[in-house]
Amino acid sequence: MIVSLCNEVLREMPFEEQCRIAAALGYQGLEIAPFTLDPEAPNRLPTWRRREVAAIAEDFGLAITGLHFLLATPEGLSLTSDSPVRQVRTTDVLLGLVELCVDLGGMVMVHGSAAQRRVSDARSPQAAREAAARCLAKAAGMAGSAGIAYCLEPLSGDDTAFINTVAEAADFIDEVGVAGLKTMIDTGAAARQERQDVATIIRDWWPTGKLAHIQFNDRNRRAPGQGTMSFAPILEALVDVGYDGAIAVEPLVYEPDGPTTAAAGIAYLRGLLQARDFLAGF
């Protein structure tokens, strides 16, 4: 496992500075929100800029582990809209982001984007579900062919009414029937929404092959260690199931500021990992 920072925590800074800070703090990767690379059309980021971003990260010893927060820009996108025009536009953007992920060397795409998956964007909940299935079949199909896990993120009910639990995501994955479509765990959303604790969810669902990624944040939306959640049992569960991907630190509240929040998250996790290694020696 490596620890990756979701880069929007440092989005006010140039990408090179984001990498410098992340590497200095001890992160081994970045999970990129595409809008931080281009606020207008990240799906059409020029080839030269893609190469530059990848090279900058490599220079700092960072892996670009994947993309998340996929539909923040451009405006007007919706996974769940049954408008043919919005469906085509949203699908085209996602296909462009799959190509971006490939070019940056990422291995996972996290489809959260709560504001762009409102059930009310369609004439009925079933129409919204069918629209999402059509869109994700194409995007996840393309991602899977490129070796990328395309993860539909369960979000808590205070963020969206569309896919709130791992079980709901798993049912939807079965409906879509595309091998590249997976789900994942956002620890804060899971703590607010799921009936089981996160460690149990990992152990129960990992054997199905449908879980492919995890993001760490507290139920209070802050970084690990900045709230009441204990992440040691979650780390143990990941070790027990043989997880070898990235742990993406994704705080959504940055107080007092982004760099301090990023530092708090990695310091807390490094302490847990070091303690685990120390105890394993006895």
Image: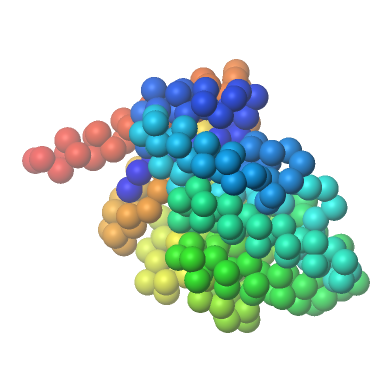
Quarter of the rendering containing residue 230: top left
**Viewer-side residue, 24 vs 173:** 24
**Viewer-side residue, 157 vs 6:** 6
- Residue placed at 56% from the left, 49% from the top? 67
Find residue 22 and report its horizontal and vertical position in percent. 45, 28
Quarter of the rendering containing residue 126: bottom right
Q: How many marks do you count on the picture?
A: 0
Whether residue 254 is situated above or below residue 75 in the rendered picture:
above
- Residue placed at 47% from the left, 29% from the top? 19
Whether residue 30 is situated above or below residue 26 in the rendered picture:
below
Q: Tell me if 135 is positioned left or right of 186 in this view.
A: right
- Residue placed at 71% from the left, 70% from the top? 135
Residue 195 shows in this picture: no
- Residue placed at 63% from the left, 67% from the top? 139
**Viewer-side residue, 280 vs 102:** 102
Whether residue 227 is situated above or below residue 176 in the rendered picture:
above
Q: Residue furthest left?
A: 282
Q: How is the image coloured?
A: rainbow
Find residue 258 and report its horizontal and vertical position in percent. 57, 24
Q: What quarter of the picture does the C terminus occupy? A: top left
Residue 202 shows in this picture: yes
Q: Tell me if 271 is positioned left or right of 281 in this view.
A: right
Find residue 13 and report its horizontal and vertical position in percent. 60, 23
Find residue 279 and report its horizontal and vertical position in percent. 17, 39
